[in-house]
Image: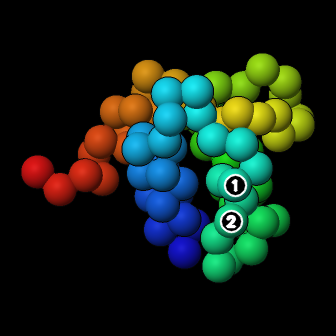
């Protein structure tokens, strides 16, 4: 399930406004806690920009590596 959630989060961020997403990124049927854990995991892997370690800071934006990872989920 985590990889499916990662796919959803990365895809939403890829198609988001260039300034990223605010707390609406947490809106998901899996629950805000699961999404927050997913975002923290993606941040640790360098796929999401992180101005502060250990805290979820908005807006949430993809790093260049995150953009590439998100594009890999896109149909060709």
Quadrant for residue 59, please give it.
top right
Q: Can residue 49 be seen in this view?
A: yes
Q: Do the residues labelled 2 and 1 touch (CB within 8 Å)?
A: yes
- Viewer-proximal residue among 35 and 19: 19
Q: Is residue 48 left or right of residue 56?
A: left
Query: What's the mark number on residue 74?
Result: none
Quadrant for residue 29, please give it.
bottom right
Q: Name the element at disc 2.
A: loop
Report how many numbered discs are placed on residues in the image: 2
Position above or below: 35 against 70? below
- Viewer-proximal residue among 46 and 75: 75
Position above or below: 41 against 29? above
Counting from the top left corner in percent of width and height, residue 23 is at: 76, 50
Q: Name the element at disc 1.
A: helix
Q: How crowded is mark 1: few (under 14 residues within 10 Å), some or many (20 or more)?
A: few
Counting from the top left corner in percent of width and height, residue 37 is at: 75, 56
Counting from the top left corner in percent of width and height, residue 34 is at: 73, 66
What residue sits right under mark 1 in the picture?
A: 24
Q: Residue at x 81, y 34 (%)?
A: 57
Q: In this view, does 49 lie to the left or right of 16?
A: right
Q: Can residue 46 be seen in this view?
A: no
Position above or below: 11 against 51? below
- Viewer-proximal residue among 60 and 6: 60
């Amino acid at each position: 399930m985590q990889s499916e959630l990662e796919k959803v989060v990365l895809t939403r961020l890829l198609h988001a406004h260039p300034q990223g997403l605010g707390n609406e990124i947490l809106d998901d049927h899996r629950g805000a806690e699961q999404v927050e854990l997913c975002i923290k995991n993606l941040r640790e892997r360098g796929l999401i920009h992180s101005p502060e370690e250990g805290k979820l800071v908005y807006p949430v934006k993809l790093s260049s590596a995150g953009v590439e990872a998100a594009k890999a989920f896109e149909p060709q």
